[in-house]
């Protein structure tokens, strides 16, 4: 009798026990709504991440969240939350190796990722999607479930990066009620790279073209990046080549331009300067003026690289900052002329890099400016 009575008294508590079965990373920008959509912010905005747990409570599902998160959106739908009590969380970044560590599955011979051949005799031939390699790195060991700051950083010290800018992905592991669960990580990939289920954080410098371009810092180079619609590798921030990353940044501004190659960019941008030779120091054969940050520079490499590809222009960069000779009259400040001292941003090996134009010389270049809508 007493045994039956005790069980009856405990039954409501047992029925309320939460059975965790899924972890989702959510984020918010400034004081905006918490959501599992990618966390995209400007550098001057506060971006935070939190781990929430989907659990079964009897016959219904509940969303357990850290203190202060009372409502959020998952897959676009609003959800009320219950307190996440007694949990520990470990945070990791999910990063792409800049250079491959294993032979390419598609036969590519480059040390960076490529979907097409870069051999002179078969340049541009489709090889199939390269396999991007990923690894995880613990950035916050087991701790309380309070939200964390969404920080952009990578493990590989030799990779080019600008502090605070670019894209990285996060994974959360949660221990709760004797169960350990994790949000999707390095294993969650398909043909195009990491799946959208691996939470992406992209921090940009601003809302203009260069600002959105800076969000692609740390995205690995994939020569011949491709994919249909939302699965284009540039759309998914899984990989991009020199032309696609430029178009991708414009698309982030709301202009639905189709992805193209270097030769196709004049369909979207007007000429500012015609073909001009740059010497080994990046100095033009004749002055190039009336250019500004955000203008595109198409590059046909000279010297030993002359004719390396069958294309009229091999590469494209964008003007990042107007600079001058530090020993000249402007002492390194802007001088309104394009030359080797100016900084350009372009898809290098194996990521976007910001460096002097002189590093891309000698070459023949022209300059384009994006057309208005």
Image (tube, rainbow, N blue to C red):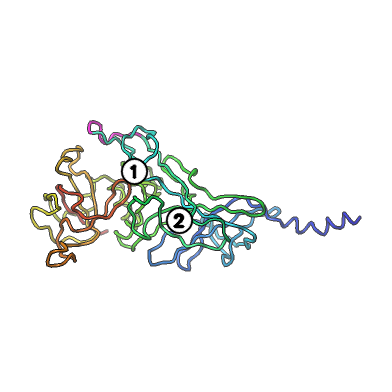
Q: Secondary structure at mark 2?
A: loop
The answer to whether mark 2 and mark 1 are in CB contact below 8 A is no
**Spot occupied by residue 164 in the image (x, y as percentages of width and height):** 38, 60
Magenta span contains residue 261: no
* SS at circle 1: strand
As measured in the structure, the alpha-carbon distance from the residue carrying label 2 to the one carrying label 1 is 21 Å
Q: Which residue is mark 2?
A: 38
Q: In the rendered view of the protein, which quadrant contains the C terminus?
A: bottom left
Q: Is 181 or 209 nearer to us in this picture?
A: 181
Q: Is residue 198 left or right of residue 321?
A: right
Q: Residue at x 32, y 60 (%)?
A: 211
Check residue 264 in the rendering and tell me which mark sits there, or answer none.
Answer: none
Using the rendered view, name the quadrant where residue 129 is placed.
Answer: top left
Please state which of residues 162 and 299 is positioned toward the viewer in this rendering.
Answer: 162
Q: In x, y percent, where is residue 159?
A: 34, 50
Residue occupied by mark 1: 222
Most frequent secondary structure within the magenta stretch: loop
Residue placed farthest to the left in the image?
A: 286
Q: Earlier in the sequence, mark 2 or mark 1?
A: 2
Assess disc 2: are there few (<14), some (14-19) or many (≥20) residues with their C-alpha within 10 Å of its C-alpha.
Answer: some
Mark 1, other Cα within 10 Å: few <14 / some 14–19 / many ≥20: many
Region rendered in magenta: 120-127
Task: State which quadrant residue 252 falls in.
Answer: bottom left
Report whether 33 appears left or right of 328.
right
Mark 2 against mark 1, which lies toward the viewer? 1
Q: In the displayed structure, would residue 349 be above or below residue 371?
A: above
Of the pair 93 and 72, the residue shown nearer to us:
93
């Amino acid at each position: 009798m007493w045994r039956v009575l005790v069980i009856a008294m405990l039954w409501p508590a047992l029925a309320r026990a939460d059975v965790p079965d899924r972890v989702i990373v959510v984020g918010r920008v400034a004081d905006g709504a918490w959501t599992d959509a990618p966390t995209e912010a400007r550098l001057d905005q506060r971006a935070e991440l939190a781990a929430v747990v989907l659990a079964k409570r009897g016959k219904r599902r509940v969303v357990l969240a850290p203190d202060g998160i009372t409502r959020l959106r998952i897959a676009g739908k609003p959800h009320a939350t219950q307190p996440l009590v007694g949990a520990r969380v470990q945070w990791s970044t999910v990063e792409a190796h800049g250079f491959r560590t294993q032979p390419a599955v598609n036969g590519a011979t480059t040390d960076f990722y490529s979907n097409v051949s870069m051999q002179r005799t078969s340049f541009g031939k489709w090889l199939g999607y390269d396999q991007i390699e990923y690894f995880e790195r613990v950035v916050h060991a087991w701790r309380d479930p309070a939200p964390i700051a969404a920080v952009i950083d990578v493990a590989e010290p030799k990779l080019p990066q600008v502090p605070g800018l670019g894209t990285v992905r996060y994974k959360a592991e949660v221990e709760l009620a004797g169960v350990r669960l994790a949000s999707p990580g390095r294993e969650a990939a398909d043909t195009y790279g990491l799946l959208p289920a691996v939470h992406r954080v992209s921090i940009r410098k601003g809302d203009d073209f260069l600002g959105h371009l800076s969000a692609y810092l740390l995205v690995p180079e994939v020569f011949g990046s491709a994919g249909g619609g939302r699965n284009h590798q540039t759309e998914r921030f899984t990989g991009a080549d020199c032309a696609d990353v430029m178009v991708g940044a414009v698309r982030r501004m709301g202009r639905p331009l189709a992805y193209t190659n270097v030769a196709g960019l004049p369909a979207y941008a007007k000429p500012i300067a015609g073909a001009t030779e740059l010497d080994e120091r990046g100095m033009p054969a004749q002055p190039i003026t009336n250019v500004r940050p955000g203008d595109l520079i198409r590059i046909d490499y000279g010297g030993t690289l002359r004719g390396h590809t069958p294309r009229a222009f091999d590469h494209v960069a964008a003007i990042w900052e107007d600079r001058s000779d530090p020993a000249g009259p402007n002492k390194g400040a802007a001088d309104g002329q394009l030359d080797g001292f100016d900084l350009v941003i372009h898809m290098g090996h194996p990521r976007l890099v910001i460096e002097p134009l002189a590093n891309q010389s000698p070459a023949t270049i022209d300059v384009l400016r994006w057309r208005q809508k």
